[in-house]
Image (cartoon, rainbow, N blue to C red):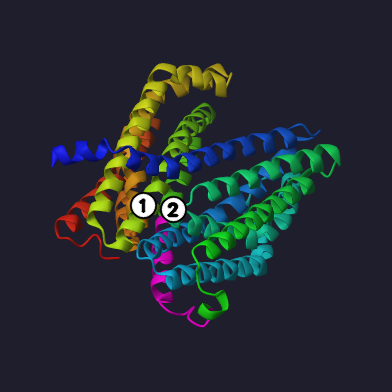
Amino acid sequence: MLQQSFSLLSNVDLHRRVLLLAIPMVLSNITVPLLGLVDAAVIGHLDHSWYLGGVALGNTMISVAFWLLGFLRMSTTGLTAQSYGADDRRKLALVFLQGSLMALSFALLFLIFHTLIADTVFSVTSASDDVKHYGYQYFAIRAWSAPAALMNFVLLGWLLGTQNAKAPMWMVMITNVVNILLDLLFVIGLGWKVEGAALASVLADYSGCTFGLWCVWRTWHQRQLPNLWKVASEVSRDIGRFVKLNRDIFLRSLCLQATFSFMTFQGAAFGDDTVAANAVLMSFLMIISYGMDGFAYAMEAMVGKAVGAKSRSELTESLLATFFWSLVICLMLTVVFAFWGHHMIAMITSINNVQEHAAHYLPWLIAMPLVSMWCFLFDGIFIGATKGREMRNSMFVATCSFFAIFFLTSGLGNHALWLAMLSFMALRGFGLAMIFLLQWRKGRFLEA
């Protein structure tokens, strides 16, 4: 078995396939923090702080709403990859149609209720009237990006499921670059302030969506998929499985959001310097996420294809090669955080107290890459295999453990918070690993 593993790891073509899927997604992820930086810089140079506060508040509301609907991408990737692996062209077309219909339905509901959502949130927030005013203004405009933003999830998932990572990379990069350029034009050039920033984001989402649709159209003709209208009558076929998978991934996402939100709010209870230090260190966690997400996406596409083809050997190859490169990346991140973490903290903040607090809790982040890599990769494995129920259940256990560990060790203060987060990441990976090994030994993992 060990000799077979070394033989597979020496397969240059296998490594090439993994990297061709992973690297484009890592590169596209890098543009995300750049967009946030430009947004903050453009709005932050206006003459009052409430503009930046309003954009931050409105953008947070939009981001949370759309992030919770991110299951559209995950489910579409898994189901598409399986159809691709099985060479089922009709199912490949059907998955795209079902995903698009679901995305546009959610977008319509969001547009119908977005005013009610805004009124409810702004009525309970303690922000100033000026921040609320501009936050509402930003949210009201950004809401109209919902059809494109939610369709982008489906487009990204479908293209990735067909083993094409370059198109999703260009989709994300085009969206972010257009947003940055229009930010500069509308806010600085035309002086449209908050409205300009919101409109730039809306047009950017539609630009990415247009490019994505063109990529799908091209793939459709290359793969000679059936006419869309011919499969439209079958849209209800297997829709129950699609809905169940989306439900399970949504509940998983809620648990994930609960832990990260608690991390922020509980950190605030420990004082201003601590919450600021945690924000700095959370940026380290985002670096891990940006690096590992690319390999998780590659895992989704490759595992889904192997499951669709019912190929145990192809699945084994995908797992070994992706684990290898993930380990390489995480070892590099561990070394970077250990030897240059203090310098990175100093680059992010110049406030001495915050630097000292962040340095005090830095060891937790040094341990994070090698502990958390397993949850990213097993998420990719189970998404590719469309096993949403297992993901939901293991996430629920990990979330309960997160809160239990924090409250049991709360006397440790902020250390308890980071201990709970590290344990949460470890338990996510461990739980899915145990389920995977059990199903693998029983020969049930390839059963989609």
Mark number, residue 437: none
> Do residues under tags 2 and 1 come within 8 Å of each other at their CB atoms?
yes
Q: Residue 128: x percent and y percent? A: 71, 44
Magenta span includes 233: yes
Quadrant (top left, top right, bottom left, bottom right) of the C terminus: bottom left
* The image quarter in which residue 11 lies: top left
Amino acid under disc 1: Met
Q: Is residue 284 visible?
A: yes
Q: Nearer the viewer, residue 48 or 123?
A: 48
Q: Nearer the viewer, residue 12 or 184?
A: 12
Residue 183 relative to residue 17: left or right: right
Point 39% across, 46% down: residue: 296
Residue 70 relative to residue 141: left or right: left
Q: Is residue 415 visible?
A: no
Residue 306 relative to residue 127: left or right: left
Q: Residue 83: x percent and y percent? A: 39, 65
Label 2 crowd (10 A; few <14 / some 14-19 / many >=20) = many
Q: Furthest residue to the right?
A: 190
Q: Is residue 326 above or below residue 382?
A: above
Label 1 crowd (10 A; few <14 / some 14-19 / many >=20) = many
Point 30% across, 36% down: residue: 324
Amino acid under disc 2: Gln
Q: Which residue is mark 1?
A: 302
**Nearer the N terminus, badge 2 or badge 1?**
2
Q: Is residue 13 above or below residue 356?
A: below
Residues rendered magenta in the picture: 232-253
Q: CA distance from mark 2 to mark 1?
A: 7 Å
Magenta span includes 167: no
Point 31% across, 57% down: residue: 306
Q: Which residue is mark 2?
A: 163
